[in-house]
Amino acid sequence: MADDLARKIDPRYSHGDLVQVARAQHQAEAEFVQSLLIEEGIPSMVRRSAGFDVPDMLAAGPRDILVPSSGETAAREVLLQAEYLTPGEADAAAAGPVRNPARLLAGLLALIALVGVIAWVGTELIG
């Protein structure tokens, strides 16, 4: 069985660091996604999502589907065609981590200031 899977892998998609392309709700769904990918020659790996790596969960709990970086674009296209991902999900997943942490920090500080002003105005009206 392992030989059959190895023959299906396209060498173009087997290089680079592992990147997450999708998330499954449980083990069975993750295996379904893996079968979609391997049929197109894209190798993949499943790991338990952070926070759910406990023995009591067994096959339950979310899973991350990872592929080599050389197969990331092809994997996203396969999952879009299979309607496993929506275009919005694919774009958000491709964006990856926060690109500009300074902009994120500025937004959070502005939100905190706004909450502070609302709280101050509320105390002035009550008192």
Image (cartoon, rainbow, N blue to C red):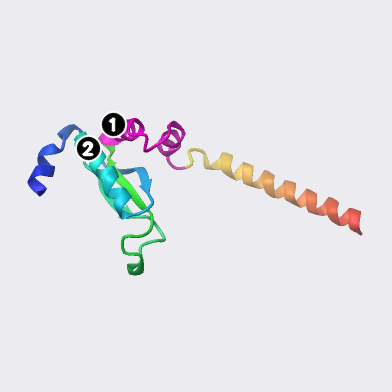
Mark on residue 12? Answer: none
**Which segment is the magenta one?**
71-97
Name the amino acid type tagged 2: Ile
SS under mark 2: loop
Disc 2 crowd, CA 10 A, few/some/many (<14, 14-19, 20+): many
Compared with residue 30, is residue 87 higher up or lower down, i.e. above or below? above
Name the amino acid type tagged 1: Ala
Q: Is residue 76 left or right of residue 126?
A: left
Compared with residue 50, is residue 78 higher up or lower down, i.e. above or below? above
Of all residues, the one furthest to the bottom in this rendering is 56
Q: Residue at x 30, y 45 (%)?
A: 66
Please, what is the dominant secondary structure of the magenta stretch?
helix
Q: Which of 98/55 is in front?
A: 55
The answer to whether the residue labelled 2 contacts the one labelled 1, judged by CB atoms less than 8 Å apart, is: yes
Is 89 in the magenta?
A: yes
Of all residues, the one furthest to the left in this rendering is 3
Task: Report which residue position mark 1 lands on.
Answer: 74
Q: Residue at x 90, y 53 (%)?
A: 125
N-term mark: 2 or 1: 2
Task: Report which residue position mark 2 lands on.
Answer: 42
Q: Position of residue 59 (x, y in %)?
A: 31, 60
Q: Position of residue 38 (x, y in %)?
A: 20, 39
Q: Which of 113/102 is in front?
A: 113
- The span from disc 2 to disc 1 (Cα, nearest Å) is 8 Å
Is 58 in the magenta?
A: no
